[in-house]
Image: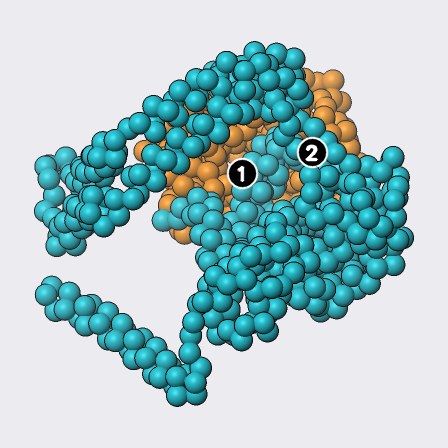
Amino acid sequence: MTGLESRADMIVCQGVKKWFGDFQALRGIDMTVEEREVVVVLGPSGSGKSTLIRCINRLEVHQEGRIFVDGIELTNDLRNIEKIRSEVGMVFQQFNLFPHLTIMDNITLAPIWVRKKPRAEAEALAMELLERVGIPEQVDKYPGQLSGGQQQRVAIARALAMEPRVMLFDEPTSALDPEMIKEVLDVMKELARTGMTMIVVTHEMGFAREVADRIIFMESGEIVEEGTPEHFFTNPTEDRTKLFLSQIL
Amino acid sequence: MVIKWISQVVVLILVVVGLAFFAAQAGSNLRAKNIDTSWRFLSVNPGIQLGEGIDVNPETGARALWVGMVNTIRVSVVGLILATILGTIIGVARLSKNWIVNKLSTTYIEIIRNVPLLVQILFWAAVISNWPELTHGAGPIDGWLIITNKGIGLPRIFPSIGFYQWMVVVIVGAYVGRRVYNKRETEREETGRETHALVSGLGVVLAFAAVGLLIHPVFGFLGPVFTAIGDFVGGIPVFVVQLLLSAAMVAAAALWIKRFLDNLRTPAGLAKLTDDDIFRIVFAGFAALMGIVLVFIVWPGLSAWLIHSSRDFFHFLGDKFEWLRTGRPLDAERPAITQTGRFPNFSSSGLVITKAFGALLFGVVLYTAAFIAEIVRAGILAVPKGQTEAAGALGLSRGLALRKVVLPQAMRVILPPMGNQYLNLVKNTSLAIAVGFADLVQVGQTLYNQTGRTLEVVAIWMGFYLAMSLLISVIVNFFNVRLRIVER
């Protein structure tokens, strides 16, 4: 693999394998994501794409292979994990906002308690981020009072508040009503334009075609094909990719 | 609108008349059978002796029942605290990934909750009966701890001479500690630096307490001051207090009405009042008027009583702060055994957990803890896994995630069933009768065996347990409302 000496490599996976009991979810993933790159991971459900990005911030533990984030290897060392997690933001399919906290407290919780920021500074940053995702007027409400699209935008703001170097998106629009998908995708597009390193697991082909620098297609825990969106959508080489595209498009 | 009001009044009248009818009917039935109600037994000497309590030879029936109530409250309060702590520990242990801890707590829960509580209480009584005999000089650590078949004797720590002077220093320390805590806490909020607010606040209080041990006699001068205040308060004429109370009530009503109107006020001006609103305002004014009538005409003794009791309170403090009184603020005494085979009842010597108290306490605590453990486990599991994952993904450590994310959400699931367990524990203490612990039910039963006043005693039992249960419900509900999550 390309060595971790190259500074531009943000995430490096080498032969990553993962089992859930007898079921092998990842069968040796080799992947490199460079700084400022937007990678979209596609694949049928159960292909291991969520498991892969959950391994990258160690919500799941891989059993074989090595994963480096910004040059730090993911091991059982707790300090490494906490360091990496505060460098890597994650947005979940089910938003996972904290229902007992206001929008403001949701966003400032980690900056205040993990980054040890002064409250005033953390709140100013939170307001800035809420402006950016377009819902500053919701700051004093609770998550239960917001629509799905608004909640997901808050979740993005919450992840950004830790000023991460990488953002992971785990099917961020799959739990949303159709009319709310666009508002979330717009925020993600804007984020990609600012040069954030992003790995996005999604079924939104339009987003993949428009925003991705590279598309990775996975099936049964393996990377089947990867390449630019142009290559992927117009001229795929693998049969399995063609079958997948014919079912979706 | 009028129909709504009339219908409510009619329903109220029907309910009251119905209840009155049933009460009258029951009364005449009882009279027909020559059973009447009489409360005279409360004021005559029942001639009974109680196993333990604040007074083992009560002079009146009322006093006997009061001793029983105090005993019930004693075992309930201690039981609630211990059951909560033990239950929480076992509940968390059951979620542990450590195999032994996990299986031990599971076994505990399965055994305890599948055996009737009465059997368990009798079991503990039998266990305690098989401990060594109570003799002079029994117990390890030079008699500071005594474990015998009559119960467990522990040293008692009590306020001694100099306690009140010392408390002055401690109260000042608590105030200063609070200020330090607040200051540190704002500093943390503003700069983000860890300032150890809680540690420094508590440290200040402890420092004051320690220094107070040495310098507390200095505060003896407060004694004459308190006596002077007491003399002054005792000299206030009754009508001044009556006027002050009336003024306070009028002010409270006026303030309430003002706040009520402020809440209704919209930016466009005063909102239109519904007749419900008008009724509330009138009612507030009427309540203040009733209060004034109460103070001046119905119960003039209230003001006099207020004067006397505050005077007595300050004179009491004056006595405690005797000029240049010195001595240790706190003292401890070992459980003294004056007689073989018998602990002294509630003497100043030692804290004694008698066999009956111990058996009942162990029984209800261990039993309730098993249920509380399951509630705690359910509450923690009820918080979706995504919450822990989201907290982890943000870089929160496991402890922080538990404290800031999981527990606040688990608490709202835990609290309502926890309240039920608290109610159960208090009511289950009535099983005391099985081991002869002098709780309200046991005392009451002895009393009606002596006097034949069964109905009256049962009425008192029901009223007491109802009051206890309502009190617990109110407290639990208070926290319930505070923890509620806002939706929509």
Compared with A144, A109 (above or below) is: above
Same chain? Circles 1 and 2: no
Question: What residue appears at the point 44 percent right and 67 percent down from the top-left corner?
Answer: B39
Q: Residue at x 36, y 28 (%)?
A: A131
Residue lying farthest to the bottom in this orientation: B32
Q: Does residue A191 show up?
A: no
Residue A80, quarter of the rendered image: top right
Pair 1/2: label in front: 2
**Discs 1, 2 touching: Cβ within 8 Å:** no
Name the residue located 85 percent from the left edge and 38 percent from the top edge.
Answer: B143
- Left/right of residue B347 with respect to residue B471 in the rendered view: right
Residue B176 at x, y percent in the picture: 51, 16
Left or right, residue B44 beside residue B326 = left
From what the image shows, is residue B128 above or below residue B256? Answer: below
Q: Which of A211 and B234 lies nearest the eye of the viewer?
A: B234
In the image, residue B172 lies at what x, y percent? 51, 18
The disc labelled 1 sits on which kind of residue? Val
Q: Colour of chain B?
A: cyan
Residue that numbered label 2 is attached to: B157
Residue tagged 1: A91
Q: Rounded to the nearest whole Å, what is the CA distance between mark 1 and mark 2?
A: 56 Å
The tint chain A carries is: orange
Q: Chain of mark 2?
A: B
Q: Tell me the SS state at disc 2.
A: strand
Image point 58% across, 56% down: which residue? B58
Identified by mark 2, the residue type is: Ile
